[in-house]
Amino acid sequence: MTEGNISELPWWKKTTVYQIYPRSFLDSSGDGIGDLNGILSKLDYLKDLGIETIWISPFFVSPTWKPYQQHDCGYDITDYRNVNPEYGSHETADLLIKEIHDRDMKIVLDMVLNHTSIEHEWFKESRSSRANPKRDWYIWRDGKKPGGKKPPNNWRAMIMGSPWHYDRRTNQWYYAAFLKFQPDLNYRNPEVQQEILDTLRFWLKKGVDGFRLDIINALFEDAEFRDAPFTPKLFSGDLDVLFKSSRMNLNHPDTIEFCKKLRTTIDEFDDPSRFMVGEIIASLPTIKRFLGEDADGLNLAFLFKSLDVPLNAQKVRRLIESYEEHLPDPFLPTWVFGNHDRFRRISKLNGSVEKAKLNAALQLTARGVPFIYYGEEIGMEQADVNVTESLDPLARHFRRIPSFVHSLLEKHKQSIIRDGCRTPMQWNDTENAGFSEAGVKTWLPVSPSYKKRNVLAQEKDPDSLLHCYRRFLRIRRETPALHSGNLRIIPPNEVPKDILSYVRSLNDEGREQQLHVLLNFSSETVDFISPLKNPELLTSTTIRSNPLHENGEIVLTPWEGIVLKGESEYILLK
Ligand code: GLC
């Protein structure tokens, strides 16, 4: 935002989001599985941390029965309007919405619109016969001749391999952009669109403040099911892989158009306004198309480039520049360093708490909406899970991949075994880390690091990562230039080599507010002269030392990040 009245900005542009994976947050019932009551009991913790919006991964009904028992832990829904009994009931969900609002926070649900579970009644009906009224709710095609025993076309699933699955009952193939047990809904069918839009309305009427939309760029496919064309690209940000374009089944123009319909639907509810954030694994120009030329599509989209950005001043500067270039105001970037699918960020930083603090400083001071994944605030690490022990269907899907590939991925801090980032939240150092009562077998093992890395221990240490998050979240919340201002990068030749500095500024009804962020991306202490008049330290990643010296010097300890308030343009090299 450049000028104007800050209070007119919708709340979601200024917010900070915390993602809860309900299975892993807190088990209140003693069955080893996290639940909604568990979340309820920790709302004060989140409020106190400074979180403004809570996104909860799906807690709707999904199979608790074999063979599809919690196959994708909620990303395989059998009933969009009810709560999985493992997590609670409608009453608990209503209470959760109320209690979150009572604390002046917002709640965002995770909607899996692209596909259902193979166990959904709709799919069971659909697959039962070609004449069933629900047949056309999913995507069915004849196979290729001769005999129809070959997939209908050459498309690729998002997880590689063919997205087509043969069903003997009716001698046709159904389409699944993700895993086989997650058949895609047919969005070319107006009944499906109606049902899904009404489902969103159902939850909006209950008061939820927005939705996270799962693989939203996969909704529509080519209407004529034409083969994917050749592309000269070996790999592209839009998931073109091995010279095959993805444009027939991903990022389809009709999906982009449908996002506007989603927007119109959620905008029916405007007191308060609601928002959607889309999961779109694509290049920045493609992502921008989903937000709409007139910002009339999805409100936000996850940007995943940050997941792997090295903590290096130049690389981070380039990343910010690319976000600023592609998503200028009124568009807004997002800052994501982890989620329930990705290798935990701190483990990419070799477990270093100092680096994790700097990372948090970047996330909470750059322009954009930050998304914090549960446990990130205490430095929870990626757990080592063997493919044979994994509960993750993606890992099982890739189980035949030779172990050296897993090792190679591991070396590059990536994993297709997603259990490693979903281990139980570490609340204290008692058995089961306070997630479940002692003696209970938790659904995934608690990471051994809980003895040292837990909420209770970090509450007691004012220089902990947890307190660092708390400080930065507070000044972000309280400082309009930080949550709503412009961002200008100080040219690299005006600051020492490993320092990244940017100014966040805001003109709110004629009052100019300017903040200076300085991040030291090195393991060395860096000192330099600041021409800032009367600089005032708003916060730092560490409380060990004062970076502002009386002679005008700024001294940043290794991996330190600070926010300053001060008059005048600066910065000069020493
Ligand atoms: C998204 C979710 C992931 C899920 C997949 C299929 O990528 O984040 O957890 O497995 O979609 O729904």
Image (cartoon, rainbow, N blue to C red):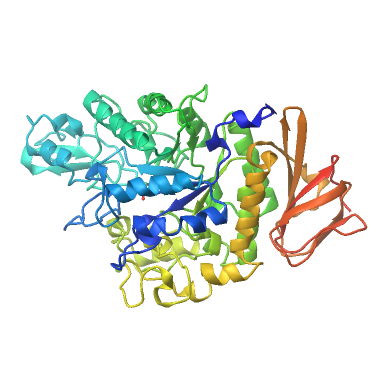
Horizontal side of 145 relative to 220 (left or right) equals left
Compared to residue 370, the image places residue 131 above or below, namely above
Q: Using the rendered image of the protein, determine whether residue 192 is visible from the camera's viewpoint.
A: yes
Horizontal side of 233 relative to 174 (left or right) equals right
Splitting the image into 4 quarters, where does residue 201 fall?
top left
Compared to residue 417, the image places residue 479 above or below, namely above
Compared to residue 120, the image places residue 219 above or below, namely above
**Which percent across, then down, holds residue 414?**
46, 58
Compared to residue 331, the image places residue 455 above or below, namely below
Horizontal side of 573 relative to 458 (left or right) equals right
Residue located 65% across and 43% down the image: 318
**Which percent across, then down, holds residue 194?**
26, 26
**Which percent across, then down, holds residue 10?**
55, 32
Viewer-proximal residue, 103 or 247? 103
**Which percent across, then down, holds residue 140?**
17, 33
Residue located 53% across and 75% down the image: 452
Residue located 86% across and 55% down the image: 528
Q: How many labels does the image show?
A: 0
Work out which quarter of the rendered image holds the N terminus and state it. Answer: top right
Horizontal side of 337 relative to 150 (left or right) equals right
